[in-house]
Amino acid sequence: MPYPPDKGERLRAFQELKALSQHFRVTLATLAHTKEDNQSAAGIRHLCERIVVAPAGGRKGLIRGGLGMLAGRSVTEGYFHSPSLEKLVTNLSHGREFPVALGYSSSTLPYLLRAHAAHRVMDLVDVDSEKWLAYAEKASWLTKWLYQREGEKVRLLEEDALINCDAVLVVSQAESELLAGFSHKIGVLSNGVDTDYFQADEEGQDGKPSLVFTGTMDYRPNIDGVCWFAEKVWPDL
């Protein structure tokens, strides 16, 4: 659910939805992992012509993830698989063709391919396979094998997106270079800041500049990022 925009993946998805709603009649098909996700749909209803929601994750998601692995797929595909959302997307496509269907992150590719659309665009955001492979480099024994396998299977999912979609978006040039073999389809859509909304308020401060790093700090790329910043950049500042 791309709302509320209070964490990385929701921020980007929300801003994309907000921008697209200015030019398109949007049908949003999304997964809900919690009761709060279902309730949050009310906050973006004004941006969408229609919202369809299906439950995902939880214990059933873990079971589906395990079954997906046994079937030769990634755990990611199994965890985010929702027969309910598949059926909803299929039903939405009956009798109509969407001019554009947009998928957000590789885990949504199966739903994107079910949509009856003239053009398909996948926003991978990050090349998730590389994160799993990076985890494998620092892991050992069974964990190393699991991470390596997940990275390889998710890479196949990313390649399917590149083969079956008209265009694929990533967040940076560095990410696009990881998929260099398909460069003719890849576009870079960087994250930004709404500087009209986020303006520093100097009242009550001592005039000295301040800096904040915010992120989910049990997520290894965020840990690596802030440590790199503290060690390599902060001393020069």
Image (cartoon, rainbow, N blue to C red):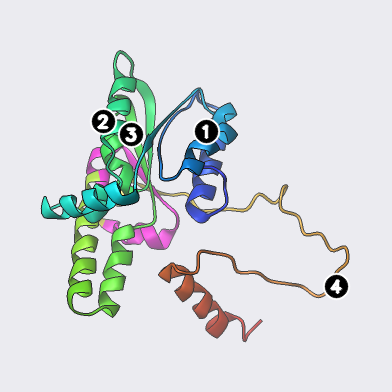
Classify 66 as above or below 104: below
Q: Around disc 1, counting alpha carbons within 10 Å, would you say few (fewer than 14), some (14 to 19), or many (20 or more)? A: some
- Residue at mark 3: 120
Q: Which label's residue is closer to the chain start, 1 or 4?
A: 1
Q: Is residue 195 left or right of residue 177?
A: right
Please name the amino acid that badge 1 sits on: Leu
Q: Which label's residue is closer to the chain start, 1 or 2?
A: 1
Q: Residue furthest top?
A: 95
Q: Are marks 1 and 4 in contact (CB under 8 Å)?
A: no
Residue 119 is inside the magenta segment: no
Q: Residue at x 28, y 47 (%)?
A: 60
- How far apart, in angstroms, are the residues tagged by discs 4 and 3? 49 Å
Q: Which label's residue is closer to the chain start, 2 or 3?
A: 2
Classify 4 as above or below 180: above
Q: Which label's residue is closer to the chain start, 1 or 3?
A: 1
Please name the amino acid that badge 4 sits on: Gly
- How far apart, in angstroms, are the residues tagged by discs 1 and 3? 15 Å
- Residue at mark 2: 114
Q: Position of residue 47 (x, y in %)?
A: 56, 29
Classify 108 as above or below 179: above
> Residue 20 — which label?
1
